[in-house]
Image (cartoon, rainbow, N blue to C red):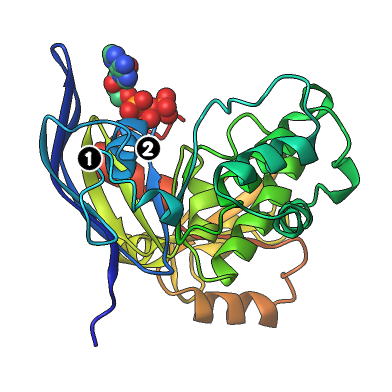
Amino acid sequence: MPPTAALAVSDLRMCYGDLVAVDGVSFEVTEGEFFGILGPNGAGKTTTLEMAEGLREPDSGTVRLLGKSPWPRDLTLLPRIGVQLQASAFFEKLTAREQLETFGALYGVGAGRVDEMLDLVGLSDKAGTPEAKLSGGQRQRLSIACALVHDPDIVFLDEPTAALDPQARRNLWDVLREIQTRGKTIIYTTHYLDEAEVLCDRVAIMDHGRILAMDAPARLVRDLDAATHVILERGALPASQAGTLPGADHVTADELSLTISTRDPAPLLAALAERGTLGGLQVRTATLEDVFLELTGREYRA
Ligand SMILES: Nc1ncnc2c1ncn2[C@@H]1O[C@H](COP(=O)(O)OP(=O)(O)OP(=O)(O)O)[C@@H](O)[C@H]1O
């Protein structure tokens, strides 16, 4: 049986006055998939997500969410979808537990579920802390717990890791992975390409309201067919010798390092190992940022 589409959007368009924010976007997300919508600020990610969730009516195009149209609002869909918005609206003065209990009560969810959610997002020890006293990362995790409290099938997260320090971002990655392990479909936006590369099954790269490429991150990078850079400490090998090694295409040097570009790293690395020059060696392969550069002709700036 073919996999079921949790979400299918077709030729979505949305303008704000003269500005075309979303310009003919189509994609499908399969049940259980972790799907990322990536792109720089203003690419149209949030607007796309809001139309997919049923929070915004498209100018044109269609959305099928769990087989139904989310606009006009379909009350039967609400228990099955969880939405975390960019700016979370919490109830003033309530503790983390009370926030969750309040959201849970809207869906008739019991206290046991609240404890489970606090545990899932690593906030059990902050249950009694007022929301105003949580750190940015903790607040983000609480808003994800609120989006999940009623056990939806699909979760929409709009830039859940924005404005977090690197450690808090990584903690949140573990939460997102755990959510996927529990069988949820995750559809999220981010402007961190490195993050999407490690988290997502598939990504859509957006720029100026359009999807430029869509696939598994590893496949997008592989199809780029870009050179691998092998970086050695300066002095490990004369540059003239490095250029004659098997697989070496091009050599550049600066004060600190010697970089050998190659499309065939295995023989190059074997030759370096034979010479005993592997100490301090780094290998840099292409990333989604290189894919973006190839697609747009400009460096990626979130
Ligand atoms: N309510 C609005 N009124 C007018 N213009 C808007 C509105 N919302 C978004 N825009 C514009 O539409 C374009 C797409 O915005 P959108 O928020 O969808 O992009 P984004 O990729 O999510 O960006 P970000 O990463 O900054 O959230 C931007 O140029 C933005 O300035």
- Count residues near mark 1 (Cα–Cα under 10 Å), then give few for <14, some for 14-19, many for 20+: some
Local SS, label 1: loop
Q: Quadrant of residue 223?
A: bottom left
Relative placement, left or right, of 297 versus 78 is left
Residue under label 1, please give it. 71
Query: Who is closer to the viewer here, 85 or 94?
Result: 94
Numbered label attached to residue 39: 2
Residue drawn at x 68%, y 82% as measured from the top left: 274
Relative placement, left or right, of 132 versus 211 is right
Does the beta carbon of the residue at mark 2 sit less than 8 Å from ligand 1?
Answer: yes
Q: Quadrant of residue 221?
A: bottom left
Local SS, label 2: loop
Q: Quadrant of residue 127?
A: top right
- Count residues near mark 2 (Cα–Cα under 10 Å), then give few for <14, some for 14-19, many for 20+: many
Q: Position of residue 156 (x, y in %)?
A: 45, 47
Query: Who is closer to the viewer here, 258 or 18?
Result: 18
- Taking the view exactly as shown, the residue that stands out farthest to the front is 108
Identify residue type, mark 1: Trp
Q: Position of residue 184 (x, y in %)?
A: 49, 64
Q: Mark 2 or 1 closer to N-term?
A: 2
Q: Taking the image as four quarters, which one is ligand 1 found in?
A: top left
Identify residue type, mark 2: Gly
What's the CA distance linking mark 2 and mark 1? 25 Å
